[in-house]
Image (cartoon, rainbow, N blue to C red):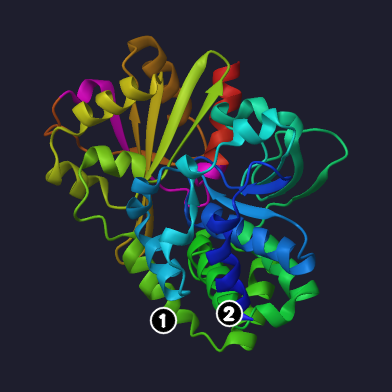
Amino acid sequence: MSNNFKTYLKNIKNDLSYDKPMTVVVGNEAADLDSMATAVLYAYYLKSLDGAVNSVPLINIPRADFKLRTEAVYLFDAAGIDSDELIFAEDLDLKRLNDKDLLSLILVDHNKLSTAHSEFLNCITGILDHHADEKQYPEGIFTDIRPVGSASTLVGELFIKNAEETVSGPVGTLILGTILLDTVNLDPDAGRVTDADSAVAEKIMAITGLDRKELFDKLQFEKFNVSSLGSYDLLRKDYKEWQMGSVKCGIGSVLLPVEDWIAKDPGIVSACEKYLKERELDVLFAMNAFTNPEFTRQIVVYIPDEDLRRKTIDFLEASDLGLSEIDSTSVEGSEKCAFYNQANLGISRKKLQPIIKDFFEK
């Protein structure tokens, strides 16, 4: 079955056509490992159930940005997947398909279209997601939106139920690796794992014989291996943005301690300013998460507008994040930026987004 999976991936590019219906499975605009893996997995799942389905996974970033997802580079390689066989943003013209009424869109790891894809709302035919349900999709479509730790858990359940024979090779590696990374190796203390995540992971380990600790340790190392990246690339490595009322807000996930980041680049605020202006944002957050030796969360808030900055910081300091300020006297332009330790480890970007969305909209 692993040969079937690899053959499927190799044939995708050769079979790309704008003259027949296409079901495109696409992850969110941050294109983290969960989004990429789930898109590839679910597209193959659809093909394995019905060979006539023209299902194509779309990696929702430029091909040049794939190298920034160091953990994804590692896991796809471990699964024997050549990145040259993947379809990236510049490889597929969704508008061309839509104009010819040939596009069906399945969203994974998000349930609201990004601004760039907003014109394709009526093309959505299904959703597999684990974020807060924003209910901005057509009525009557297939949806599975549950607060599990990893979207890959949802597609893993489908493989186990309906196509278990395909899980023994690269499919199992992709599912298990993604679940382990998203749930911090199924650790309840990280506040992300659910019974569903654990059940799928245990089943796949039983089928594949993969070593949980070994796989997680390698992925964790690669995820935090950002030593070669400057501040600009750190901000864009794992990034999402939203329009929240009149406020355009971006949140990057940065995988090293704030203290190390400041020591590496005292001009961090300049990098934030450049990125904010480039993305035309009002607010830029960096949520830092790392394990050294224990799992830790920190948050950086960059807001040029003084009034908005003060109101936002007052809100965050009074919230359940459990913030304590980090010394930033060595940072150039620190008056526009705030640096915090975050005591509440359960609030990830996924959970912070609806909290600040409600605040900004009010």
Task: Inspect the magenta stretch and tell me whether residue 19 lies in it.
Answer: no
In which quadrant will I find the N terminus? bottom right
Residue located at (53% from left, 63% from top): 183
- Residue 56 in the figure: left or right of residue 178: right
Residue located at (88% from left, 39% from top): 140
Mark 1 touches mark 2? (CB < 8 Å) = no
Residue interval drawn in magenta: 333-350
- Where does residue 83 sit, x and y in percent of width and height? 42, 61
Can residue 42 be seen from the camera position used here? yes
Task: Inspect the magenta stretch and tell me whether residue 337 lies in it.
Answer: yes
Q: Which residue sits furthest right?
A: 140
Reply above or below: 345 against 249: below
Residue located at (58% from left, 79% from top): 3
Amino acid under label 2?
A: Asn
Pointer 2 residue: 3
Amino acid under label 1?
A: Glu
Reply above or below: 215 against 303: below
Reply above or below: 331 against 178: above
Choose between 100 and 121: the one closer to the eye: 100
In which quadrant will I find the C terminus? top right
- Where does residue 119 sit, x and y in percent of width and height? 65, 25
Occupied quadrant, residue 186: bottom right
Pointer 1 residue: 214
Q: For mark 2, does the 10 Å Cα neighbourhood hold few (<14), some (14 to 19), or many (20 or more) residues?
A: few
| Tag 2 secondary structure | helix
Q: Nearer the viewer, mark 1 or mark 2?
A: 2
